[in-house]
Every structure is written in C-alpha cells, then in structure tokens.
Image (cartoon, helix red, strand yellow):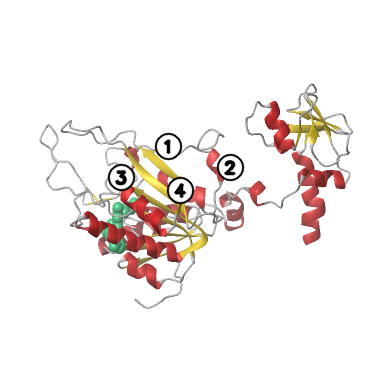
Amino acid sequence: MMKQNLQIDQIIHGECVEVLNSLPEKSIDLIFADPPYNLQLQNTLWRPNMTQVDAVNDQWDQFDSFKTYDIFSQNWLQACQRVLKDTGTLWVIGSYHNIFRIGKIMQDLGFWILNDVVWIKTNPMPNFRGVRLTNAHETMIWASKSKGSKYTFNHHAMKGFNEGKQLRSDWVIPRELVLPICSGSERIKTNGEKAHSTQKPEALLLRVIISSSQKGDIVLDPFFGTGTTGAVAKQLHRHWIGIEQKKKYILIAQERIDNIEPIVPEPLIEDIFDVSDKNRLAPRVGFANLIEVNFLTPGQKLYFQKNPVNEAYIKPDGNLRLPDGFEGSIHQAGKHLMNGSPCNGWQNWYFESPDNELVVINELREKYRKKFIYENKT
Ligand SMILES: C[S@@+](CC[C@H](N)C(=O)[O-])C[C@H]1O[C@@H](n2cnc3c(N)ncnc32)[C@H](O)[C@@H]1O
C-alpha cells in the first residue's frame, strides 16, 4: 500500500498491518484495539436445554497455532507503535485466551504498561458444562509508547465515574448493554441476528476515550468491527480512523456513525467536550512565589482544613513550621497532620483574609497565575 496522508474520520478497508504501515509515523493520539481473541473453539457449544450457544466462531478469529497468533500480534502491535505519537497510548482488550500473550509482546516491544483494567460483566455467560468458573470479565491493557513518555490522562474527569474518588481499575459495565435481551439495547442486528459477535459496549469506550484523549485528538481502531470506537469518538468530538478487513462490517459501522448528529451548538463544543485536567496543564507556581509578590508574608499563620486550632507559621523559604516542630512544604506539613496520608497542600491550607475570612491558598495561586503569567502573555 502507498504511503498516504492521514485521512481522518474514515473507515479504511484492508488488512490492518498493511494499512497502518501506510499511515504517517507518530500521527495518532490514542489507539483502541479489540483484536481477534483466538478463542480456539473446536466444537459447537450447547446449553443444558440443548439450545446452541451463540459463540464467537468467525473465520477471522481462527489461527492454526499460538505461534501464528503471536506473529500476527507482534506485527500489528509494532505497526501501532510506529503510528502512535510519543505522547500517545494504546488500549488492547482481550480475554484469558490471548491477553497474556499480547501483554508479553507489548512489553518486549517497549510499550510501558500503565494499568490492566478488568471489565467486569454483570451478566456473564455461565460455564454450561460446569467444568470451570464462570468467566465474568475481560481485561484491557493500557500502555504508553515507551517507559517515561508523557501521556494524556484525564485523572479528574475519571473521578466522575466513581463518586468523585479516584477511578479504580475494576470497571463494572453490564454486558447487557450489547445483548439483544435488553430493551433499548445498542446491539446492532441484521435480519434479527447480531451483526457482529464481539460488539463492545459504548460505555466501555466512553471511559477509555475520556480517560486518555483530548477534544480534537485522533483515535484509531485497527479492528473496527461495527465501529464502536468511531461512534463514541465522534460523540465526544474526537477525530477517528477505523481499519476493518470485512466489507459487511464496514457498511454497518459507516451507517452507525453517519447517524450520529452533533447535539451541542458549535460555539459550545470546546467548553462541553474539554475534560482535560486544567490544574495539571496550568503553569506551575511555587508556594514561595506567593511570598515574593507579597500575597503572603513570612511569619503569617495558615490553618489546616479551615481549623483555627491546626495552625502553622510560614517560613521565609516557603516551608511551614508546625507547633510540634515539624517543618516541610505545604504538602509535607499536610501529610504530617494527616498521619502520613497524601495531601494536596493547595487545597487544604487556609489564610485569613483582610475581612477575617478563612480562604484556601489555592485562590492565591490562581490570582498569581492571572496577574503574573496569563496577563504577561497577552
Ligand atoms: C473483536 S472484533 C472487533 C469488534 C469491535 N470492537 C466492535 O465493537 O464492533 C475484531 C474485528 O477485526 C477484524 N479483523 C480481524 N483481523 C483483521 C486484520 N488483520 N485487519 C483488519 N481487520 C481485522 C474482524 O473482521 C473483526 O471485525
């Protein structure tokens, strides 16, 4: 395949390694891959009531040996690594059949594993023969391109999925979301049959894309199937590229994505779909900078968590001194008062304003940015 310019918001028909190799190097922000699982199903599966289990026995999932599967995996992973920007990340979903092999190959290629996320299914298919445990989850590996690379992670945005607390790596997402038994299901059907055996829930992609991309980024899926990745990326105002070898799935995916209309007026899109961690991206301000510009004075008192009893003196170098003699940064002093638990000092120390109000010091940091950083840039 000829080298091509990046054609965004399109499905490219073809074998993913060939297509990936034709794309420009370091051009993609995020890749989500749902590769063949190599389920190795030899025989038809039957339920105890002698109905047939609708299992994955597609030709695209067949490999004649682990070795063939490993070579295939190494080729597409390597091709993904080439097109990923240095700041990009890769998510791969799989089951016990393939995910360990894929994880090993990823590490060998130099990907740096950030998390393995377990997608817990609330209504998994039982093990009908009763010879094993019910297999109730799939695993996603999330990795940066290499060790130490800076990557996108919208840490604060993800708290929205866990009542304001840091999101954990076990995600409970009902499998019913893509099962035909559920009314209002998103499962796509053709002539009453499911159109694709392994269509993923949009809820899963929602988390993946929000966590690790910004508005306007390019999200690529090399095993596009029914286009779940593209559908969610489009809803979230990310650009997308899908690669799929089967024309019948391309038609389904294209129709699905074409039917998504933007629901937010253009001028508001930036505000609504930007979930980046503003504080993380904001210019850094040291606590001592606030003393330099007379927002605070050496010797002034701060109060921990607004409690007048928990006071500390500000030292000229920006450290705090506690009544028990402990000295350290605003974060270390907070940690000391919280018996070793991590503490963001900016959010926990208060100063007394001229109106005798206790005000969190983070407000002074914002004031500093506005006065000395942002204004100087205009
Ligand atoms: C596990 S399914 C992905 C399903 C998708 N995540 C969805 O929600 O619909 C894998 C897809 O990859 C496609 N595929 C398999 N091998 C491929 C290859 N070498 N190049 C391109 N597509 C391939 C298959 O046709 C299948 O549609």
In the current view of this chain or complex, which residue is farthest to the front? 325
User: What amino acid type should be assigned to the residue bearing mark 1?
Assistant: Asp
Q: Which residue has dot 1 on it?
A: 170
User: What amino acid type should be assigned to the residue bearing mark 4?
Assistant: Val
Local secondary structure at mark 1: strand
- Give the alpha-carbon distance from disc 4 to disc 1, as whole Å: 13 Å
Q: Residue at x 82, y 44 (%)?
A: 290
Decide: few, some or many residues near mark 1? Use Cα within 10 Å; few <14, some 14-19, many ≥20: few
Q: Earlier in the sequence, mark 2 or mark 3?
A: 3
Q: Earlier in the sequence, mark 3 or mark 1?
A: 3
Q: Which residue has dot 2 on it?
A: 156
Q: Which residue has dot 3 on it?
A: 95
Decide: few, some or many residues near mark 2? Use Cα within 10 Å; few <14, some 14-19, many ≥20: some
Q: Residue at x 50, y 48 (%)?
A: 210
Foreground disc of the pair 4, 3: 3
Decide: few, some or many residues near mark 4? Use Cα within 10 Å; few <14, some 14-19, many ≥20: many
Local secondary structure at mark 2: helix
- Give the alpha-carbon distance from disc 2 to disc 1, as whole Å: 17 Å
In the current view of this chain or complex, which residue is farthest to the top? 309
Picture quarter with ligand 1: bottom left
User: What amino acid type should be assigned to the residue bearing mark 3?
Assistant: Ser
Residue 181 position, x and y percent, is: 27, 38
Q: Vertically, is 215 above or below 245? A: above
Q: Residue at x 74, y 40 (%)?
A: 362
Q: Are marks 3 and 1 in contact (CB under 8 Å)?
A: no
- Can residue 249 be seen in this snapshot? no
- Give the alpha-carbon distance from disc 2 to disc 3, as whole Å: 29 Å
Q: Earlier in the sequence, mark 4 or mark 3?
A: 3
